Image: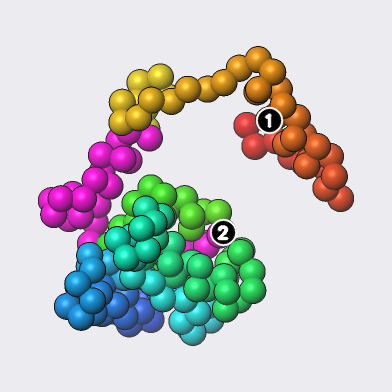
Amino acid sequence: MPYTKESPEDHAFLEKAISVSRHALDDEGKTPFGAVVVVDGIVVGTGTSSVVELHDPTAHAEMMALRAAGGALQNHLMENAVMYSSSEPCPMCLVACYWARIPRLVYAATSHDVAVNGFEDLQFYRELALPNRDRGLLEEVPAGGQLRKDAAGALAEWADRLPFAVVPKL
């Protein structure tokens, strides 16, 4: 999908995300990341990086904003939402936006800006682009035999219980 220009509304909500990141840094001593989820011009979720305080490596600003938005909307799908982030999301947060079906993401600082300041996002993007066998940041061990059959069997049972036919996503 090609890049589109930011709108005046985008500018205002992106300023809000940056303000959240500055508050996190200046007032809370956190890393300077902020995110807001907006639906129909209303902020439904706000987040700052809470990784250290929660002892949770997934508690990035975007993840926290998605959790807050999910609670406010009482839904895990946000097909009418826009994610505004002070920085380009890391791979985990980007994929979380995909899982939430958020159709639009607007960010300020790029992954390059983040990398220049010591964060690993670009390294992770590069790593994920490699085939599994060529990755080097952790040891991946795919199980085979009966363990794979058992795990795949549970997935198949789940799919069989759905009220509609599953479309493979191969």
Decide if residue 67 is on the left or right side of residue 76: left
Image marks 1 and 2: residues in contact by CB distance under 8 Å: no
Count of residue discs:
2
Residue occupied by mark 1: 151
Decide if residue 26 is on the left or right side of residue 152: left
Is 16 placed above or below 1 here?
below
Q: Residue at x 38, y 72 (%)?
A: 47
Nearer to the camera, 150 or 66: 150
Q: Horizontal and vertical percent for residue 146?
A: 69, 18
Q: Amino acid at mark 2?
A: Arg
Q: Secondary structure at mark 2?
A: loop
Q: Residue at x 72, y 36 (%)?
A: 155
Using a 10 Å C-alpha cutoff, classify the residue at mark 2 as few (fewer than 14 neighbours), some (14 to 19) or many (20 or more).
some
Inter-mark Cα distance, 1 to 2: 26 Å
Using a 10 Å C-alpha cutoff, classify the residue at mark 1 as few (fewer than 14 neighbours), some (14 to 19) or many (20 or more).
few
Q: Locate residue 110: give its quadrant.
A: bottom left
Q: Amino acid at mark 1?
A: Ala
Task: Look at the image and give the residue range highlighted in magenta.
Answer: 100-128
Marks 1 and 2, the one that precedes in the sequence = 2
* Residue 93 seen in the current view: yes
Work out which residue is located at the far left of the displayed protein and give it: 116
Was residue 143 drawn as part of the magenta stretch in this picture? Answer: no
Residue occupied by mark 2: 101
